[in-house]
Every structure is written in C-alpha cells, then in structure tokens.
Image (cartoon, grey):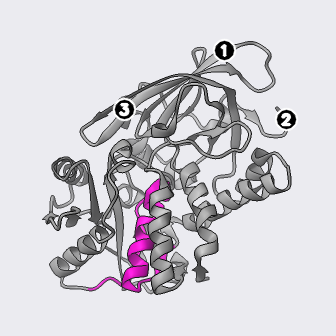
Amino acid sequence: MAWTLDLDDLHDLARGAALLGTGGGGDPHVGRLLVAEAIREHGPLTILDPEELDDDVLIIPTAQMGAPTVVAEKLPAGTEGSRALTTLEEHLGRTAFATMPIECGGVNSMIPLQLAAVRGLPVVDADGMGRAFPELQMETFSVYGVSGSPLAIAGEAGEKAVIDTGADNKRMEDFARALTVQLGGVAHIAEYAMSGAEVKRVAVPRTLSLALGVGRAIRTAREANEDPLHRLAQFLGTTPYAHLRHLFTGKVVDVERNTDGAFVRGAARISGSRPGSSAAGELRIGFQNENLRAEADGELLAVVPDLICILEADSAEPITTEGLRYGQRVKVIGISTPAMMRTQEALAVFGPQAFGLHDEFTAVESLGGSIVGED
C-alpha cells in the first residue's frame, strides 16, 4: 500500500539508513538536509509498494557513488541526480514513472527522495542491495538478470555522460568508477532502468519502510529509557532481517583508512569483551566502504552479505566508517539478510569471495554472537 513520507519521518529514516549502511553508504545527514529542503519546497513524497506497480511502467533507480570520506567533505549542488535521470531518459526515449534507491543504506536512501521531490515523482519502496555495497554490480538487480546499462552519470559542474557495457555490469562499474574519480571522487548516477514486473522479481522489497522502522525503534527505546538493542531486535524479528546478534562491546583502539580509487579501505580494532564474558579480547572489523568481516580473537563472528553495524554504546546511534575514532565506546551487532541475498547466485556477486576474503559465507545466526536479551 502506498504511503506518504513527510518531514517528521526524516530523522528516523536517516538513522535507520545509517545502520543499514553497515558503516558505509555515505553519511545520510547531508542527504537528509537536501530532502528536507525539497519537501518544504515541493511537498511530501509518495512511496509506492513494489507489488502494486503495473508491470509495464518504467522505473529508473538513482544514486550517488564515490568514497564516503569524499562524500562527507564534497557537498552536492543538488541538481546532479536530476541531470543524470534526465540524461538517461533522453537516451532511452522514455520518461520514468518513478525512481527507486539502488541501496537502502546511507546517503543513497536519501538521494532518490530529493530527486523525486524536485521532479514530482513517486519512489518505490525497494532497492537492489538490502543494505549498502561498494560496487554497482553488487545488486540483486544484477544477480537476477537485469542489465545496469545504459548508465547516465553527472557531476556537480554540469558534466554528464552515458555508459553502455551491455550485459557486463562489472565493466559498467569499472567505467563509472573511473569517471567518478575524474569528477572529484563523487558523482550521481541513473542506472538499471527496468519495468514494474522486473522490480517485483529482482528488488529487495520494502526497505525504505525497513529503514524508517529501524530508526524509529532506536529513538522510541531511548525516549522510554529502554535498551535500544532489545527494541531493535523485536522490530527486526517481524521482517526478513529477523536475526540480530550482539557481537562485541568495547572501545575503539585503532582505525586504519585509505581512500583509493573512490573506495575507502581499512580496518578497525575494538578492545573489550564479548557479551556474557568477562575475559578481555579484541574485535577486528575489515571494511571496503562498508563493514565486511568481524573477527574476535581468531573467531569469525559475521561476514558479508550479513550486516555488521557499529553503534554508540549508550545511544545505539550508528557510526559510519569515516566517523570511527579512537576512544569511542561502541557495541557491534550482526544482522541477517533476506533469503534472496543468500542464494548461491547472490553470494557469487556480493559474498565473501567477491571482496577477496577467504571465508565461506556462514549465517550470522549460526556463528558466535549473543541473542539480544540472553546476553
């Protein structure tokens, strides 16, 4: 069922998107400000349930791409997304019925909303990652047979280009990444144009609703002086992201970050203990834009595509990889992904080996994390 997104929803949505971004996806704060301004000027947004789309309508997902560390410092002009969408529409000779996020985590939960408000378009309540991933081929759209090409890309100074690599979505990512570097490390894109029927087949459904519910669960728990993790676990238990595990609590003691080729790569070390244990230990989290792997004292606790989220210890406010600092007191949680993100086809595109990791994927609920409420 369609619903309306208004200004009052944006803080909760941004908080939930930051958590679902698993450390990456870009901090949604600036995106939230852009959406708020667009809603004030143009009115609230209509969010469409994917199951209610007509099969033959054209949906064009839109997004920002680049390294989160650059995104945090290089503010958008606010016109890039609309230019990318218009460029792709002109190339296709068709007008989009609606837009849609390519990922539900981080700033890219917000970019399509700002564009949609300006253009007067509805937004589909779905996406192609069910979280955030660093590369454009790492989408359920691609996994289940939709071509990302042609892709339109736009920069802040009016630049625009169209990339068409046919069915090779990895090659499309390589070309778009190279152009993004030339555009200063950040660009806006329109890609994976598809029909309503294809959206229903290949997209992760209702992830804007998911992000809104996640952010609301954390906020209302804090207002009621309850443990946000308990409220969050209760909410997620009603969704396809049903399993939340508390992995570690401690202090950030080291962060290594390197911006390379419009990616941020590095690792964080957290000194503390696992839930229910008094023994001191250390958790290491490796990331490429997003958190990919969590290991405590040689034991794997979570691995991509499951979500690894670092939260402020007291407030459960999500912390992005670019926001990690020495001395922060944190809790680390793992969250399971939907079944369509755990198939062999999906794992071949965004499982551990796709990031050069040697682990076989093991579901977070089968590893050593603690069930919230039992820790």
Give the residue displayed 43% in from the left and 80% down from the top: 117
Report the quarter where the C terminus lies: top right
Q: Nearer the viewer, mark 3 or mark 2?
A: 3
Residue closest to the eye, 324 or 203: 324
Amino acid beneath label 3: Arg
In the rendered image, which quarter is residue 145 located in? bottom left
Q: In the picture provided, is 294 more to the left or to the right than 198?
A: right
Give above or below for 175 relative to 366. Answer: below
Amino acid identity at mark 1: Gly
Decide which of 24, 353 is in the foreground and name it: 24
Q: According to the image, label 1 marks what residue?
A: 281
Gap in Å between the C-alphas at discs 1 and 2? 20 Å
Q: Residues within 10 Å of mark 1 (few under 14, many from 20)?
A: some
Residue 264: x and y in percent read: 35, 37
Q: Residue 151 vs residue 267: left or right?
A: left
Q: Find disc 2 in the rendering and name its residue.
A: 374
Q: Identify the element where label 3 is drawn.
A: strand
Labels 3 and 2: the sequence-earlier one? 3
Q: CA distance from mark 1 to mark 3?
A: 24 Å
Point out the stretch of residues depicted in magenta.
95-124
Q: Nearer the viewer, residue 156 or 332?
A: 156
Q: Amino acid at mark 2?
A: Glu
Residue 128 visible in this rendered orientation of the protein: no
Question: Quadrant of the rendered structure where residue 238 is?
Answer: bottom right
Q: Position of residue 130 (x, y in %)?
A: 51, 56
Which label lies toward us, 1 or 2?
Answer: 1
Q: Position of residue 222 (x, y in %)?
A: 78, 52
Q: Is residue 246 visible?
A: yes
Q: In the displayed structure, would residue 295 be above or below residue 27?
A: above
For residue 266, the mark is none
Question: Mark 3 highlights which residue?
Answer: 265
Q: Quadrant of the N terminus?
A: bottom right
